[in-house]
Image (cartoon, rainbow, N blue to C red):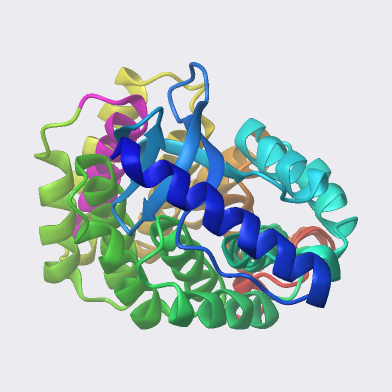
Amino acid sequence: MKSSTPLRIAASLVCLTLTTAFGSTCALAQQEGRVFPLKGGAAVKGIIIERTRDKVVIEVRGANQSFPSNEIARVVFEGEPQQLTRAKDFIGQGNLDQAIDEFKKIDVPSIKIDDIKKDYEFYRGYLAAVNALRAKGDAAGAKTLLLNWAKENANSNLFYSASEKLGELAMATGAPSEAAKYFGVLAASPFPDLKVKGGYLAGKALLALNQTAEARAKFAAVTQAQVSDPASLKLKKLANVASISCDAAEGKADQALQALEKVVDESDSADAELFSALYNTMGGILQTSGKHEEAILAFLKTDLLYASEVDAHAEALHWLSQLWPKVGESQRATEAKSKLAKLYPTSQWLTK
């Protein structure tokens, strides 16, 4: 491998010369850059010689290092706009508004390297999806951007992330059958954590389609998965809650409510994602059983305690707007509906 390095350097110099002289786009198969491991530690710098759906291979001083896609926080290319690099950093830190602000500053015509162009187009769609899912942007436009990118980059290490966001957009816009297909890409990956995530999300999509048996099978696979990372363990808990809702859908409401109460008693109420799912599931079962006051109390817990969970909060507000009139509180129904429209103007729950 050492003997090939000078050839790559020479190719880079030729590309640089052509780009400088003629302003042409240069698509190198190998590009200098850095790979940042997801679990922290120093970035690995070298020549990126391979990017596939499942791995990135980087040559460091003549030796190859391979990183599985699910263990990569981000890849940064030499020569990419600083704003793009900063946007990637902010995404990794969870500072999405700052990432969007940085991304808007990118001088797109200055990007000449093909790998960097592909990254730009991915993050353009990804951040548009983030905005749409927070009810701050156009879901249809975000979907178009990501689909266009995915058609050209189906073997990219970013493909799983694109598929996940496409699935989330499909769910948010009331297209669970599409969502199940996108989430199926994750479930079919070779990585246990992505299998768990994809299986859980596909199960939720199938449940939205009232395909209870198929959904239960997905949730069972998740709850039985041999995983130890925190994210997957949380998904196992959520899959258990979703599986209990399958019991209720099959006429076992009392049994399901008892099981949910047990999960509440055994879990940490600081887990907003889990508890918003628990209370919304309880609320759904209770209202189906005609227990409107109890259902309202369940949805109010999500509204008042776990509003940070956007989709769960929107769902709770929707059902509160439907339930308040049943107990003679029409004004509170109007308030819930107005709150839903104000906070989540593009949410699917507004049109249900």
Above/below status of 56 relative to 12 = above
Q: Quadrant of residue 277?
A: top left
Residue toward you, 347 or 317: 347
Above/below status of 21 relative to 244 = below
Quadrant into which the N terminus falls:
top left
Q: How far from the left and from the top, in percent, is residue 162? A: 48, 64
| Residue beneath the point at 28% across and 66% down | 185
Q: Main secondary structure of the magenta part?
A: helix
Quadrant into which the C terminus falls:
bottom right
Q: How far from the left and from the top, in percent, is residue 226? A: 11, 32
Q: Quadrant of residue 289?
A: bottom left
| Residue beneath the point at 66% across and 43% down | 88
Please state the extent of the stretch shown in magenta in the rendering.
228-247
Q: How many marks?
A: 0
Above/below status of 230 relative to 237 = above
Q: Quadrant of residue 224?
A: top left
| Residue beneath the point at 29% across and 26% down | 229
Residue toward you, 148 or 317: 148
Residue toward you, 32 or 10: 10
Is residue 105 on the magenta stretch? Answer: no
